[in-house]
Each structure stands twice: as C-alpha cells, then as structure tokens.
Amino acid sequence: MNIEITRGRSEIYDILTHLTFLFIESHKIKDRVVINNGESFIREWLLLEDIVLHNKTLTDEEKDVIVVHLGNILGRTYDEIYDAYNTFSTEENPNRFFHLIYWLGKLAINESLYDQKRSIKFSSVLTEEIGHHYYGELWANSIKKVLLDNGLIERPIHIISANMHSVMNSIYAKNALPKEAKKHKDFQLFEVLSNANSSALQSAVKNYASENGLIYIKDTSGTNINVQIIDTDKIDFDTNSFNKVNSVGEKPVIIVMDYAFGEQAFETMDELLKPYKTGGKTIHLDVQSVSIMGKAGILEGGKGDIMIPSSHIFEGTADNYPFKNELSKEDLEGFGVRVFDGAMITVLGTSLQNKDLLKFFHDSTWNVIGLEMEGAHYQKAIQSASRIRGNISENVKVRYAYYASDNPLETGATLASGGLGMSGVTPTYAITQKILEQIF
C-alpha cells in the first residue's frame, strides 16, 4: 500500500503519528486472527471477511453477532464496538467500521505473510514547500510588516515561544483587574484567570492589554501559530510588579509566538530571525534574546515539575546542541515545585518512544531529564542565525524551561492519565515571571 502525503509540514507529524498508531493496531489484529503459523484464520475473521468483500447487507441480529466477534478480535466490550460502529456508519456505507477493521488487519496480514510492504511517499508539491519554508516565510513576514507599520522593527526585540495567555496575564492582569488582584495574591489571580468560567475576566485583560501596547496577530499563513507583539514603552511600570531596570531607555519589543510543533519550530524561528526586505531596504532585527517555554515529558519527578535544559540531544541524529541557558535551576526554586537540570532529548514523536529507550537516555551518561519535540529545532535555527549566517547578534541570549506534562516511565503519570489542570498554573507562571524579570 502506498500513501502520498500532500499536506503542509505542520500537519505531517500528526498524520505520521496517527499512521504509526494504526500500523501498531493493525498488527495486533493480525496476531489475534492468524493461526497455525499463517496457514489459517479464526472463524470470526472469516465471517468479517465475507461481509466486507461481498458488501453484505446485515439484519440487526447479524450485526449484533459480528459486533460480538469484533469485540473478541479487538479485546473490547460489546458497547464499545457498537458505539464505534455508529460513529463510523454513514448512509452510503453503514458497515464502514467493519471495513476499517478488516482492511487494517488485512494490510498487516499481507505485510507479514506475503511481504507486501506499506510505504509513505511525499508529493513533489510538499517537498518544494518544505524546502522553501513556504508557510514559515509568510508567517514571519506578516510579523515583520506589523513591526514596521508600528515603528517597532528597529527596537530591541525579545522573542518568547509560549502560550497566548501567560505573558499577557503576567504583564497586564494586575492593572486590568485591580479588585481581583487585591483579593488574590501571588499566582492565585492567574488560577482564577485559568478557570473556564472566567471568560469575562479574560476579556477584560485582553482589552486592557490591547490598549496598552499589545498587538494581536491572528495567523492567516497556515502555520496555525498566533502572535502577540508587546510594545513595552506603553506598559505602566509604576503599578506593574516588574522592575524595568534592564529596559530603561531601550524600550524593548516582545514577540510572543504560540507553540510550534516539531520541525515547524525550526522553520518559523529560522524565518523570523532573517532580515526583512522591503522597498529595496534590508532590515536586520535587533534580537537580544529568545526564550522557549513549553510542556515536556519528565524522566525524574512528576507532573508540574520544572526542567531546565543545558543541552538538546536530537533523537535519531548525531546532532547535539549545548548552550548557555540564562535560566538556572536556582531561578525556579522556591515556587513549591521541584526543579531539575540536565540534558533534554528532542524526540521525533511521542508515539515512537518506549520505556527501554527512555531508561537508556535517563540512566546512561547522557543523563537526560526529559523529552520534548521542539528544543533542538529552535536551537538549530538560533545558532545558524547568530553564529553562521550573521542574521542576528552572536551575543543573543537564550532561555529554555519546560514544565512536566507527564512522566512516561511511570504508570498513571502518562499523558493518557489526564492533563495538568490547575497544577500547571504555578510552573507556567513561575517560568514566565523569570523570563520577564530577565528581559526587564
């Protein structure tokens, strides 16, 4: 079977992850239905094959029987199979779920018994778009045009890769919500804002921010990465909790970009750090720092703990990226969460990991404390822009900090066990606060 992928780079990893899961599940089906070393198949599989290949119309009683058989093959209950059947059913093909399961298993059978391998091909259009950073270039140029139009492009710039709320709330929330700020001390105000029922308060912060230096750029390029530009000259530091000692006279600009995904991090950062060409003029951005905050899997500790990387190891390659991290373990201590420092591995996909591999990285001399998907890509773009291509100053400062979304080595602490909830507020805002303190 050949699959041709024509989608954009930002969607490739989702597709490959799903294909990986489907590949694994298909072989589970094959293992359950093949008997006698491939010479025959279980009765339930032969009944399913007869229904699918002859596209039979089933009575309710016949459908119930095959649902029970599928439950035996898939190791699921009758109700679970029936719910899946109804989800996939269409007027044109009511037995669509039966077809899906059959062909999943059939492809694995063909691959194992008859050496009919599956392959994935990338279209020439996709290859060309990836090579030219098509979406990343559109995205970066739209940001630079906004900087130019607002007279900000020649000011000192600090880039932060984070979510779309923590930087904005850290700078503006106390001024936007003075009554709530008096009632809720420290990070309690941010917990209130993180509540799903606080849409009115969230809107108040957004409106106040937009009137005091924040410009929101909704992505239209196809990267799905929204951006905030903050003109710090319009921030009221007299009532703000930050000391502006580092920004006096400089009036820096902060660019907050939403999380990139995998190699998309290289494309977007590489394009953002390039000079902006307009009207025959080339403008180099005065990028003074790049800060990366994100979620990652932790290999010691648990959900909500913080990781401070000293280097990024790129899985599957010989590429390693040591760097001087402006954030230290000591910076993030004292917030009530544990902090770990050491190397982190940038993985190609969470579905491709297993405990043996992760234990090797953690227990060996690699001393890996966690895994994420963007760090090496970001650092590759930053190093090439600052140390090789001369697009930005070689003295650019970098900051990396991650909070743990899961521990894949611990049962009950994986991503499948649920999100962080309110326990994610403290590490998120602790990291954000330290990044902003160093900028200001």
Image: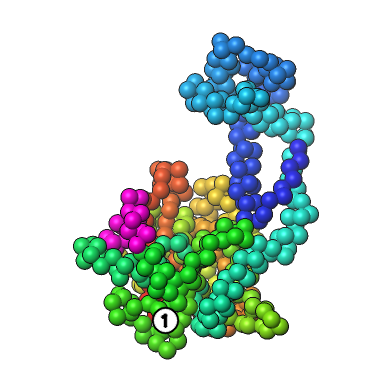
Indicate yes or no whether the magenta region holds residue 201. yes
Secondary structure at badge 1 equals: helix
Relative height, residue 67 to residue 118 (above, below): above
Q: Which residues are magenta?
A: 187-204
| Left or right of residue 26: residue 1 | right
For the question of whether residue 268 can be seen, the reply is yes
- Residue at image x 63%, y 82%? 283
The picture quadrant where one finds residue 139 is bottom right
Packing grade of label 1 (10 A; few <14, some 14-19, many >=20) is some
Q: Which amino acid, mark 1?
A: Asp
Task: Please provide percent x and percent y for residue 416.
Answer: 45, 43
Query: Badge 1 is on which residue?
Result: 233
For the question of whether residue 315 can be seen, the reply is no
Task: Please provide percent x and percent y for residue 75.
Answer: 52, 26
Looking at the rendering, in which quadrant would you find the N terminus? Answer: top right
Q: Residue furthest left?
A: 183
| Left or right of residue 97: residue 309 | left
